[in-house]
Image (cartoon, rainbow, N blue to C red):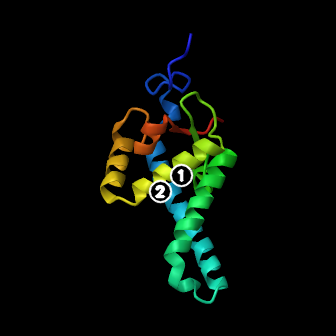
Amino acid sequence: MYSEPLSHLPDPVHQAEFYESVTIKRGLAWVIDALFIGILATAVSLVTIVGVFFWPVFFLVVGFLYRWMTLASGSATWGMRIMAIEFRDAYGQRLDGGQALLHTLGYTISMSMVLVQVVSVILMFTTERGQGLTDLVLGTVALNRRA
């Protein structure tokens, strides 16, 4: 009666093109997003008198809001959109606001602990769907965008 989670996603063996180079694209998208967040955080910090002293806090807050809003609105950050990849949930649907919040929270927690982030990156390279730790917990997957 109920379908198996992940069964609505492309099969990594028979439809490998959906997963091809996604891990590398995620890395490049991360760099693009980090640059964009850095520019935004710098702009916000320059608006205030003491903002330069709080730049790391601005970077964290701007980055969290940026990731959450872009994932909620299009299931991909702007860097991911440039790299033509997107997140899907276990049932093949785009992420909604709650899922985007949970994914962003999981990402933020994993980025705050080096060992957890290293494990997540290793998982992206070794799991058949290229899922990181947060993806495995939430059942999300990054795919090449459908043409």
Look at the numbered discs 2 and 1 and tell me whether their residues touch, using CB distance below 8 Å.
yes
x and y, in percent, of residue 21 in the image: 46, 43
Q: Residue at x 52, y 47 (%)?
A: 103
Category of crowding for the residue at label 2, using alpha-carbon neighbours closer than 10 angstroms: few (below 14), some (14–19), many (at least 20) = some
x and y, in percent, of residue 17 in the image: 51, 32
Residue that extends furthest to the right in the rendered view of this protein: 73
Whether 68 is drawn above or below 4: the answer is: below
Q: Which mark is residue 108?
A: 2
Q: Residue at x 54, y 70 (%)?
A: 59
Decide which of 25, 140 is in the foreground and name it: 140
Q: Residue at x 53, y 30 (%)?
A: 90
Question: Where on the picture, by quarter, is residue 51?
Answer: bottom right
Kind of residue sitting beneath label 2:
Thr
Q: Which mark is residue 19?
A: none
- Read off the residue under disc 1: 104
x and y, in percent, of residue 114 in the image: 33, 59
Kind of residue sitting beneath label 1:
Thr
Decide which of 120, 11 is in the foreground and name it: 120
